Structures are given as C-alpha cells and as structure tokens.
Image (spheres, grey):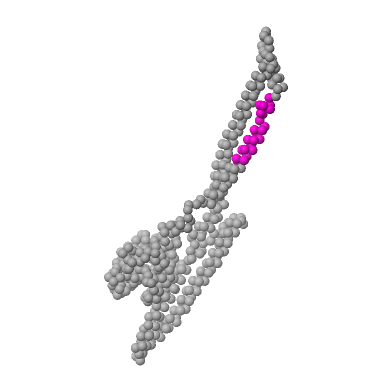
C-alpha cells in the first residue's frame, strides 16, 4: 500500500528504531553534565582538603618538641639531680647515685616519652584529618550533586520543551523564571525563536490553504468548459480525445488541491473535538470503496469492534479513506485488504501487493512520494495519501507507522488515544 509512511517506531516521537538512531548519534556511553560537575566539585574540594591536611601536619610537626633539641645537657643534668635527690629515701645510708649516670638515665626516659608523645600526636592528627576529609568529601559530593541539579534544572526544562515541539505544535514555551543570568537569557532566546518559527509556519499554512482554495474555482470552471465541449455534437475525434485527456488532468489537479486543503487543515490542528465512533467511520468508508475494490479485483475484509475516539469525524474519515484506497490501488489482481480495529493500534490496514523495500518505507510518508518509481504515473493519486494520514493522526495526538509485509504489501498501524 505504498503512498507515504514510516517504519514502526521510526517516526520522530520515538520507538525502537528512533532509540537506536539516537544511541548512534550519542555514540559511546557518556557521563551526564550533572555527574561531571559533581565529580569536579568533589575533586577540587578533595584537593583543597589534602593541601590543608598537609599544611596542618607540617605546622604541628614543627611546633611539637623534638627530643634531640628539647633535651640539652643542662636540662638533663638538672633533671638527673632532682630525680636522684627525690628518689633517695630520707634515712638512706648509702652514697647517692652519681650525677652523670642519673642524667643519662633521665635523658633516655625523657627522650622515649617525648618520642612516644610526638608519634602519638601526629598519628592521631593524621587519622582524625583523614576521617574528617573523607566525611567532608562525601558531604561535598552530595552537596555538589544537589547544587549541580539545581543549576541544570533550567536546561532540563529547555530540553523537555524542545522534545515536545514539532512542526505542527509550536505552542510550547519555556517561560523560565529566575534571575537575569545566562540560563534565563538562553531560555528567553529560545522562546523568541519559537515565536518566529510559529509565525513562519502559520504563514506558510495559511498560504497553502488560501492558494488551494483560490485554485479550486478556476479548476471547476475549466472542468465545466471541458465537459461542455465534449457534449458538443460537432466535436471531432481529435477534440474529443484532447478533451478527455484535459478532463483527466483537471480531475487530478482537483484531487491534488483537495489533498493540500485537507493537509493544511490537519496541520493547523483541531479547532473542536467530539466523540467519534471509529468503527462506524470504517464501515462507511468500506461501502464507499466497494466499486473501487471490485474494479481492482481486490477482496476487502473488515474486523470491526466498537471503538470511540475524540477528534474530528471528517478528518478521521479522510484518514481511513486514504488508507483503504491506497491499499486497494497498490495491490495485485485477486489480492486482499484487511482492516482491523483494536485497542492498540486503534486501526490497522494490511494489504497484499508487490514486495516493498524496507528501506523505502520511511519515505512513503513524505508528500508526493509514491510506491511506484515514477511521479506522474499514478493518475488516480496525488502522492499526499499517507502524508495526510500522518498529519491527521498527529492532529489527534496519535501516530502512524508502516512496515513491509514479508510476502508483499504493507501494514499501516494508526495509534489514537482512547
């Protein structure tokens, strides 16, 4: 059923193929900006903490007494005399300990005590500093994580707004509140750009709609003049042949103009919504295409169930008509068309036909693209069929996807919110 389409999940709104393409664009796995900022904050804090610990260690080490410098000969001698005198009992009858021996003994004891005190103090300082550094570094990472998230929150707002935007829906704005900083300036610039884009798209759509509407009148006049000329009994064979050719060309131009009008209308969105029974719309379209299916030798089978959607009945009927008409036209003799209404997707149209290259399927949704290689060979189609289907589906907050069937033909799924 070539006419215009995308693979399942390959449209701009996501799906497996879109995710795969996004992964390919992103390349290898990368850390987020928030993670990098947090690591940067924590790294700088850890470096500053290490420098502070080293400086503190050097200062304290220089201030603590060094036994070799603190214990001089005079200090050792006096300590030895005092300790020797105090160590002797009052009624001692033996001679006092020699001063030199007492001084040497005291110096050894004092040196050992000071060395142990210095070593214990420095060890305690290093251990306490390391614990404090680890704890504060963890707190710094946590604080940096929250601060980075707060600083990057406007960027997430900008990103989410950009993801919701598309050509037919440019009504989203960031409207960032906060101080007049770089992020506020970026958000305001983005909103201004969206205003200009919205104005440009609206102007383009109005031009297409107005031009299409204005062209309908001269085409109708031309068709009337051609039909009147063909009814003239004096018209010769050459004039009749030329008139028939002109009439066929005129009808094709009218279908093209009508398709552009529908496309412009659906691109502008829905001005009003109402409950629509999708199964009744499909049943009506099947009746309208009975003659076309009979002439093409195609069997149409519909498996319908009650399904109500909110939208525009006229546009939904055009969506179904384009799908069914394409499925009948791009088929093979004694072929078939299967129409199914379900929950997800809401509408599925499958048909037999020639083998369709999977690579060519995404381009079928583009305007004036047909399954046949020539652009002008399909006189009964304007090349806007699936373009209108996609536009109408998006106007109803839905999406459409297509895939090639293994044995030929296409399957087109239309997803619509309940």
Residues drawn in magenta: 49-71
Q: Residue furthest right?
A: 74
Q: Is 198 located above or below residue 152 in the figure?
A: below
Towards the viewer: 168 or 50: 50
Q: What residue is at 37 percent from the left and 65 percent from the top? A: 357
Q: What is the quadrant of the N terminus in the image?
A: bottom left
Residue shown at the point (59%, 36%) measured from the top left: 129
Q: Is residue 200 visible?
A: yes
Give how far across and how far down residue 272 sits, in percent. 45, 67
Residue 37 within the segment the image draws in magenta: no
Q: Residue furthest left?
A: 334
* Residue 237 location (% of width, % of height): 34, 88
Inspect the magenta stretch and tell me whether residue 55 lies in it.
Answer: yes
Which of the image's four quarters has the C terminus?
bottom left
Q: Residue 281: x and y, percent?
A: 35, 68
Q: Is residue 376 left or right of residue 99?
A: left
Overall secondary structure of the magenta section: helix
Q: Residue sitting at 68 percent across and 26 percent down?
A: 70
Determine which quarter of the picture holds residue 255. Answer: bottom left
Q: In the rendered view, would you say 272 is above or below 44?
A: below
The x, y position of residue 408, in whole percent, is 32, 66
Residue 340 picture quarter: bottom left
The structure residue drawn at horizontal position 54% and vertical position 55%, both measured from the top left corner, is 155
Q: Nearer the viewer, residue 305 or 372?
A: 372
On screen, residue 271 versus residue 78, left or right, reads left
The extreme bottom residue here reads 234
């Amino acid at each position: 059923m070539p006419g215009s389409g995308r693979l399942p999940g390959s449209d701009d709104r996501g799906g497996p193929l879109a995710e795969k393409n996004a992964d390919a664009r992103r390349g290898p796995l990368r850390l987020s900006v928030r993670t990098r900022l947090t690591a940067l904050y924590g790294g700088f804090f850890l470096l500053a903490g290490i420098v502070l610990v080293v400086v503190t260690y050097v200062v304290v080490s220089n201030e603590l007494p060094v036994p070799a410098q603190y214990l001089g000969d005079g200090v050792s001698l006096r300590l030895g005399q005092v300790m020797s005198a105090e160590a002797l009992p009052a009624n001692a009858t033996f001679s006092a300990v020699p001063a030199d021996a007492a001084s040497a003994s005291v110096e050894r004891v004092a040196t050992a005590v000071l060395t142990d005190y210095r070593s214990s103090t420095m060890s305690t300082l290093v251990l306490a500093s390391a614990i404090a550094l680890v704890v504060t570094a963890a707190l710094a990472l946590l604080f940096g994580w929250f601060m980075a998230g707060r600083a990057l929150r406007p960027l997430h707002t900008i990103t989410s707004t950009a993801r919701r935007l598309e050509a037919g829906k440019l009504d989203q704005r960031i409207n960032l509140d906060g101080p007049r900083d770089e992020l506020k300036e970026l958000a305001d610039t983005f909103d201004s750009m969206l205003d200009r884009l919205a104005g440009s798209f609206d102007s383009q759509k109005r031009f297409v709609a107005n031009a299409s509407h204005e062209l309908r009148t001269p085409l109708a006049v031309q068709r009337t003049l051609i039909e009147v000329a063909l009814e003239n009994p004096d018209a010769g064979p050459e004039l009749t042949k030329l008139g028939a050719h002109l009439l066929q060309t005129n009808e094709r131009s009218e279908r093209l103009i009508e398709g552009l009008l529908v496309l412009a209308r659906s691109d502008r969105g829905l001005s009003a919504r109402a409950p629509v029974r999708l199964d009744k719309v499909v049943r009506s379209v099947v009746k309208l295409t009975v003659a076309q299916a009979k002439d093409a030798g195609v069997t149409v089978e519909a498996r319908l169930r009650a399904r109500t959607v909110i939208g525009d009945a006229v546009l939904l009927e055009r969506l179904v008509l384009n799908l069914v008409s394409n499925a009948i036209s791009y088929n093979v003799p004694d072929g078939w068309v299967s129409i199914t209404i379900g929950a997800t997707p809401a509408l599925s149209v499958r048909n037999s036909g020639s083998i369709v290259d999977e690579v060519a399927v995404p381009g079928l949704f583009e305007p004036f693209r047909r399954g046949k290689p020539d652009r002008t060979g399909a006189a009964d189609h304007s090349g806007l069929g699936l373009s209108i289907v996609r536009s109408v589906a998006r106007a109803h907050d839905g999406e459409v996807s297509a895939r090639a069937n293994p044995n030929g033909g296409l399957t087109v799924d239309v997803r619509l919110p309940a």
